[in-house]
């Protein structure tokens, strides 16, 4: 045993909650998400001995595959993971089944019901079923209806439904979708997934804030001058042009992932760590949040689109040259904006949010910039005094760092900033998953803590309604600024902060 | 968490009528209320010390059976009054043995089985069957039954279950055990929580601890060799077994694992040369389970050398690189021991990587600062010192059982299964060495 690779004393110590006998039904099983995320996450749960022996995965899609074909395809998709775990895969793959289903055809869904009954008998899954809608968003409503009409959501204790993002395209469509879904199942059966909430580092924001007594007293407008939330990608649109052209950065990233990070960063402490207490607090923050200038949204929001970049050896295409993208596309691949949260804790503290593709670095982080010391007694080595800064690194290099001033060595009394750092890697040395492992387990356990509730989703859409309306009605008022690939977005994004005498943190 | 009473006053029925009453109870309900589809928990609940303390007038009734502060404090007083060693834990059999089994003269309510700890009721057991033997051996059997619906703390859904109590003298309970089997739903997992000393009433234990039952025992309660032997026998027979004494070790194992979570510290584990464990009193089981877990995790082999003197028990392991690791188990006469016998209060690991003591590392985990200082003695301060405080677990047994029920996969923990045989062998060596000495 190479004890430097893994901590031998850690093995088997975690007391995870036990997933009850379960049948997970994945709609869209022939799709990318199933093979890239869902099946690998389930296999990981299996390796961690977290799946019950009474377990089954039923893949559903329109293609007429057999069980064997489905298993073979999943095995091909997971080649790397299986290499080291052949025996485990052999057992795990025996849990995989396939049923051809077109969610638009009621007879298919009824047939699926019969198949699930047979699998219940075969695998003793006790009628506990989690339905995962990994299908195109336009099928969410009809998918739920079909399941409901087939009686597959009848038992609120045993049947659940997981819905991928995006949940709606705007406030009214989200309301409409909620209405339909809630007519098919009660809220406790509905799990709206946002995989960012499954990330250790996002959950760590809650622990950092509410398990330590030193942060919460200063986590407010008296001590914090501004908050910056960044989620930057280096990749372009890749093969998602079909989807991305219709959504853009605002719908793809800001309304869900970044808004959830904002909610967790800004929420009040819940009375208990239970799903409703946490979701109540998140919903309250989102209801209190608004764009810095709702009447003139162009004053607080910048949109951008990446141009070509790279170098001669490795040239990068502009967004409009990407396969599947309209050459005159006005879809934003970058967005930066300024928000406020109107409550006692955050009144007057700007929250700056930015996300984009083809930026300089892949990084997601929440940065809390503290107010400067009221009196500067010392000369700053860097020319001007620095304020304290707490950086919560979501990915990569997961961890946190705190910047504060110390005395610069030598004669005199000059101050300079240093960093105190916590790194998950150095402290725990364990690999991270992308959130699906945790969220799939939670959904099967019926724990909705890390899933978004209907009012949260609606509040998040409502928050961006002035922008969405502006883009829809008079897009020229919110122009698309081009930016060179692998830079930090258009210069106008910097101007957004410069107006407040601030700078984006360069991660 | 406060205990919950059954919502319905338990009905006293003749034993033979209980199955039909329960059938009627659930069948009469609306079709969608068939009771919780969870598990059945059978509890051996003698509560001898509580009954004895009431009989000698140390505490007043009712008899509840759940671990409560009043009983623990009164038991501590008995330790002093009966001049037992000060390190005797209040739940030690010696306390019970020192009390006479007086007949309870005044009438006290006996609520055993009806006072469900909320940590357990939140798990919504389908059926709780309590075997409640009385001090009075000749008491006739009384059987009580009640339906109950736990009130969920989080406001979520609740599923109902029922409680059954069989109360009476040992003989009357023994002669009705067949009926108990009939009351256990076949289609649900069934657990037996032996909430008493492992070596008491072996006949009843044999009758209720059927192979299909998942056992919950406490190896801190009972004669150590019998406790470890039962543990090992169950593992060998592939019967699911859970040990509360092992569960109480989790903070030690967790804290020790935390010390070695940073990758740069993991190499220290390759070079360990000493393991010292201090325990309260003289029950060695928990200490042996901890070192057995460590040895198993680090691939150490046992040797046959063992020394016993005033410095405790000393033995050696061989590391995978054939170097020796010395292990010492030291019983300490503490003034106010924790509730359970033989709890660990200190652990020290010493690692030697070169000739200079500066390169050596000493890891000390202790339950209090005095113990930290004790383990620091002998030049430990000259080494790189890693110290952590591990508070002793004083959770009630009910909370520990609830934790087990909610996290168990229905099989024996592989870590316990691996550690238990090694702990047994170590104990056998200690016992043999004592016999030679005598």
Image (spheres, coloured by chain):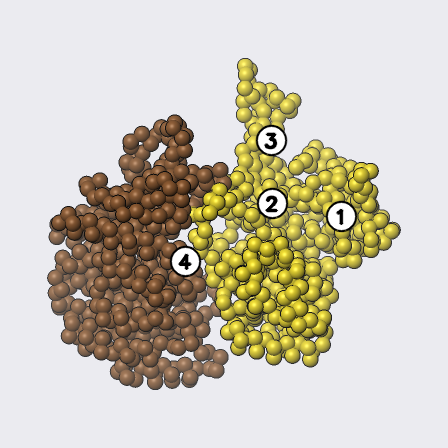
Residue topped by disc 4: B414
Q: Give the residue at x 31% y 61%.
A: B231
Give a yes or no on whether discs 1 and 2 share a subunit.
Answer: yes
Disc 1 crowd, CA 10 A, few/some/many (<14, 14-19, 20+): many
Q: Is the Cβ of the residue at disc 4 closer than 8 Å to that at disc 3?
A: no
Between the C-alphas of marks 1 and 3, the distance is 34 Å
Q: Are marks 1 and 2 in contact (CB under 8 Å)?
A: no
Q: Write down the colour of chain A.
A: yellow
Q: Nearer the viewer, mark 4 or mark 3?
A: 4
Residue A116 image-quadrant placement: bottom right
State the SS at label 3.
Answer: loop
Under circle 4, the secondary element is helix
In this rendered view, identify the residue nearer to me: A119 or A293.
A119
Percent x, y of residue A285: 60, 51
Chain under callout 3 = A
Residues at marks 2 and 3 touching, judged by CB atoms closer than 8 Å: no
Q: Which residue is mark 3?
A: A387
Q: Which residue is mark 2?
A: A394
- The residue at 56%/27% (across/down) is A405
**Residue located farthest toward the top when viewing the structure as drawn:** A411
Q: Which residue is mark 1?
A: A236
Using the image as rendered, state which of residue B405 and residue B429 is in the foreground. Answer: B429
Tell me if residue A37 can be seen.
Answer: no
Please state if A50 lies on the left or on the right of B358 as rendered.
right
**What chain is tagged by disc 1?**
A
């Amino acid at each position: 045993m190479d004890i430097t690779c893994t901590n031998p004393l850690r093995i088997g110590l975690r007391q995870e909650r036990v997933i009850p006998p379960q049948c997970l039904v994945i709609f869209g099983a022939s799709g990318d998400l199933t093979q890239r995320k869902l099946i690998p996450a389930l296999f990981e749960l299996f390796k961690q001995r977290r799946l019950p022996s009474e377990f089954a995965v039923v893949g559903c899609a329109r293609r007429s595959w057999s069980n064997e074909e489905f298993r073979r395809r999943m095995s091909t998709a997971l080649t790397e993971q299986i290499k080291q775990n052949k025996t485990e895969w052999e057992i795990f793959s025996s849990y995989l089944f396939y049923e051809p289903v077109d969610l638009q055809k009621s007879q298919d869904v009824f047939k699926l019901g019969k198949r699930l009954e047979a699998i219940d008998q075969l695998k003793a899954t006790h009628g506990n079923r989690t339905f995962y809608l990994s299908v195109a968003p336009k099928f969410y409503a009809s998918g739920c209806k079909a399941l409901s009409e087939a009686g597959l959501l009848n038992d609120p204790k045993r049947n659940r439904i997981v819905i991928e993002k995006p949940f709606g395209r705007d406030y009214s469509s989200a309301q409409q979708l909620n209405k339909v879904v809630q007519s098919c199942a009660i809220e406790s059966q509905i799990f709206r997934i946002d995989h960012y909430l499954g990330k250790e580092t996002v959950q760590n924001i809650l622990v950092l804030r509410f398990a330590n007594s030193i942060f919460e007293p200063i986590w407010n407008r008296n001590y914090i001058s501004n908050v910056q939330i960044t989620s930057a990608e280096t990749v372009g649109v890749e093969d998602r042009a079909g989807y991305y052209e219709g959504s853009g950065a605002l719908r793809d990233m800001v309304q869900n992932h970044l808004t959830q990070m904002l909610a967790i960063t800004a929420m009040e402490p819940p009375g208990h760590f239970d799903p409703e207490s946490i979701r109540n607090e998140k919903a309250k923050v989102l209801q209190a949040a608004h764009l810095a200038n709702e009447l003139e949204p162009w004053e607080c929001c910048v949109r951008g689109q990446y141009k070509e970049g790279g170098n001669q050896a490795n040239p990068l295409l502009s967004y409009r040259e990407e396969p599947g993208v309209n050459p005159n596309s006005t879809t934003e691949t970058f967005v930066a904006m300024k928000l406020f949260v109107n409550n006692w804790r955050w009144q007057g503290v700007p929250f700056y949010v930015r996300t984009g593709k083809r930026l300089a670095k892949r990084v997601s982080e929440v940065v809390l910039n503290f107010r400067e010391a009221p009196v500067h007694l010392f000369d700053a080595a860097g020319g001007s005094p620095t304020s304290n800064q707490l950086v919560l690194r979501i990915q990569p290099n997961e961890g946190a760092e705190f910047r504060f001033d110390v005395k610069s060595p030598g004669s005199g009394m000059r101050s300079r900033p240093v960093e105190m750092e916590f790194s998950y890697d150095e402290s725990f040395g364990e690999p991270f998953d992308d959130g699906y492992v945790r969220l799939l387990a939670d959904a099967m356990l019926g724990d909705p803590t890390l899933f978004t509730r209907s009012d949260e989703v609606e509040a998040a859409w409502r928050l961006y309604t002035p922008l969405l309306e502006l883009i829809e009605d008079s897009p020229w008022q919110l122009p698309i600024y081009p930016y060179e690939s692998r830079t930090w977005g258009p210069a106008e994004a910097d101007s957004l902060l410069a107006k407040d005498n601030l700078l984006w943190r360069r991660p | 968490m406060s205990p919950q009473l059954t919502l319905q006053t338990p009905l006293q029925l003749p034993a033979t009528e209980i199955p039909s009453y329960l059938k009627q109870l659930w069948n009469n309900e609306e079709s969608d209320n068939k009771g919780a589809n969870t598990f059945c928990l059978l509890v051996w609940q003698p509560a001898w010390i509580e009954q004895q303390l009431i009989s000698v007038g140390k505490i007043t009734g009712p008899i509840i059976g759940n671990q409560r502060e009043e009983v623990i404090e009164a038991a501590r007083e008995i330790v002093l009054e009966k001049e037992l060693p000060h390190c005797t834990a209040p739940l030690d059999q010696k306390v019970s043995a020192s009390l006479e089994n007086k007949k309870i003269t005044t009438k006290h309510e006996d609520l055993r089985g009806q006072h469900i700890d909320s940590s357990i009721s939140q798990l919504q057991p389908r059926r709780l069957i309590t075997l409640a033997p009385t001090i009075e051996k000749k008491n006739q059997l009384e059987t009580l039954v009640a339906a109950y619906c736990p009130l969920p703390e989080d406001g979520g859904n609740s599923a109902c279950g029922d409680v059954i109590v069989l109360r009476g003298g040992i003989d009357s309970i023994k002669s009705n055990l067949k009926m108990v089997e009939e009351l256990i739903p076949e289609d649900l997992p069934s657990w037996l929580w032996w909430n008493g000393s492992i070596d008491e009433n072996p006949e009843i234990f044999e009758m209720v601890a059927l192979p299909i039952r998942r056992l919950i025992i406490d190896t801190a309660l009972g004669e150590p060799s019998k406790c470890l032997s039962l543990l090992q026998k169950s593992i060998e027979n592939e019967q699911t077994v859970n040990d509360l004494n092992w569960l109480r070790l989790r903070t030690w194992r967790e804290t020790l694992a935390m010390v070695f979570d940073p990758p740069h510290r993991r190499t220290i584990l390759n070079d360990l040369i000493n393991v010292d464990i201090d325990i309260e009193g003289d029950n060695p089981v928990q200490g042996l389970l901890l070192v057995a877990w460590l040895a198993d995790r680090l691939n150490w082999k046992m040797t046959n050398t063992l020394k016993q003197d005033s410095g405790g028990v000393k033995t050696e392991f061989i590391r995978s690189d054939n170097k020796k690791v010395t292990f010492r188990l030291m019983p300490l006469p503490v003034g106010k021991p924790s509730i359970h016998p033989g709890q660990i209060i200190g652990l020290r690991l010493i690692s030697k990587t070169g000739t200079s003591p500066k390169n050596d590392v000493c890891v000390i985990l202790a339950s209090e600062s005095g113990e930290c200082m004790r383990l620091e003695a002998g030049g430990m301060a000259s080494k790189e010192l890693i110290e952590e405080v591990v508070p002793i677990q004083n959770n009630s047994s009910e909370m520990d059982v609830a934790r087990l029920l909610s996290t168990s996969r229905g099989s024996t923990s592989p870590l316990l299964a691996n550690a238990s045989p090694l702990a047994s062998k170590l104990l056998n060596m200690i016992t043999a060495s004592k016999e030679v000495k005598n």
